[in-house]
Amino acid sequence: MALEFEKELTATETGIPGMLVFDLPVHGDSRGWFKENWQREKMTALGLPDMGPVQNNISFNDDAGVTRGIHAEPWDKFISVACGRVFGAWVDLRPGESFGQVYTCELDPSRAIYVPRGVGNSYQALEDGTAYTYLVNAHWSAELKSTYTFVNLADPELGIEWPIPLDRCELSEADRRHPMLADALPMAPRRTLVTGCGGQLGRAVRALAEARGLPGFDYCDVDTFDLSNPDDYSKYDWSLYGAVINCGAYTAVDKAETPDGRTIAWKANATGPALLARTCAEHGITLVHVSSDYVFDGASLNHAEGEPLSPLSVYGQSKAAGDLAAAGCSRHYIVRSSWVIGEGRNFVRTMRSLSDRVADPADALDKVAVVDDQYGRLTFTRDMAEGILWLLGYREGDVEPSAPAPHGAYNLTGSGPVESWAQIAARVFDLANGNGAAVEPVSTAEYYAGAEGPVAPRPEHSALDLSKIEATGFVPRDWTEELAEYMAAL
């Protein structure tokens, strides 16, 4: 079959989720031909994941009929032919509805295919002297070999119509012994590491992952994995991970203004994320980094993701530095929140306790001063956890990501009205004991007058624009509705 020249670069979906066939422009004349076999910018624009290849392999086949496979390894592949032709057959060996799905096509120098991790790969050389090439985004290692999975080339359940019958082909003994599909082991999904699992958000992510039955989630906190300590990174085989959700942070805003607190804040919020981002970039891991409204100065009424960073406090400066470091990982989500509420000590629980004291005739507390010149929305950790899994690509029923959102920064808070801390406190008081009138609005300056120790400057306006994450299909719940549910559960 003659090689087709001057085709337009196109990408075509296959019946296997995530697998794409590329028609490649090949330019030829009397001397031979030339092509751009791999072109990151053009191909990612057509839907190819930014796979970040680290190794280029060539399999040369002396004779037509050489047949290899069906192998699934824990990495993505971009497969093409340098010379000759192959008949390729691919079988989805990932757990889920598409397990066992088959796709076949011929490849020549003008056609290539992207094969996601966990899809079994096989081919048959159709011409003598065929050179089959593939880029992969993980290095081969003896440790990883135990994670491979296989299926038999001749399994009748697959229904593969090999152009050259297999009994006339050159096969390895190992390929002949591979199991049938009914006995094949699905490839385990890449694992997800959740750092800071002891905090409000970390606990919420864990609870949601366990409620959905998501496999492969590992959890750690600073006592077992200190992100700012380079030596701690050797505790993990990073080749097994597909995502890291960094829920850890130092959030003592006022203590961060002290000499000791400044050191701790920069260690946890900047040094740690920088080391983590570098590790994720080196291993093709998706990094989810949780950030804060404090990276902005609060001058805007509604902060968009692209607003220039302008932190007022040491805490905000350390978080902004962490954002910049996380953005250095090509596969990243920076998730910005404000006024976080979850399990453990938080503003709502404190206000609930004060409302109970006001309602107690034996307690002398009549009024509670609350700041009335800082404005924002509450962010409930359950909503944040759902939004993070959504960005990673988890949809209802998924055991591994299927439709990740474009990488980048996203605001993720509750939707609903923008209110001051005092207005929110009054809501809590009313829901608890009907005594919202006991909340006394005061200015920030009045509230902190006479405070012992340094006080960090706060953004006046902390509302975050939610249009970007809503455009992905995730619409955060109204925080006022969540507040009522949260209070009822206390």
Image: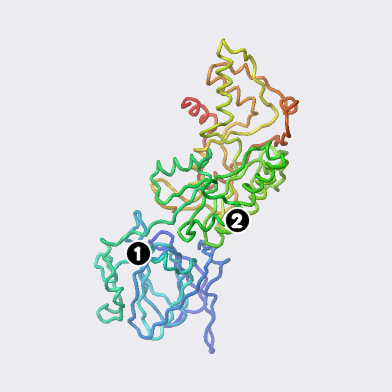
The quarter of the picture where residue 295 lies is top right
**Residue highlighted by disc 1:** 149
Is 114 placed left or right of 157 in the picture? right
**Judging from the image, what secondary structure is the residue with disc 2 in?**
helix
C-alpha gap between disc 1 and disc 2: 32 Å
Looking at the image, can residue 140 be seen?
yes
Q: Is residue 177 above or below residue 242?
A: below
Looking at the image, can residue 111 be seen?
no
Type of amino acid under label 1? Thr
Decide which of 435, 199 is in the foreground and name it.
199
Q: Is residue 364 above or below residue 96?
A: above
**Judging from the image, what secondary structure is the residue with disc 1 in?**
strand
Q: Is residue 486 above or below residue 35?
A: above
Q: Is residue 6 above or below residue 324?
A: below
Decide which of 367, 21 is in the foreground and name it.
367
Earlier along the polypeptide chain: callout 1 or callout 2? 1
Q: Residues within 10 Å of mark 2 (few under 14, many from 20)?
A: some
Q: Residues within 10 Å of mark 1 (few under 14, many from 20)?
A: many
What's the residue at 38%, 86% (across, down)? 62
Rendering coords of residue 76 (x, y %): 46, 65
Type of amino acid under label 2? Leu
**Residue highlighted by disc 2:** 275
From the viewer's perspective, is the residue at label 1 or at label 2 nearer? 2
Task: Please name the colour scheme applied to the rendered image.
Answer: rainbow
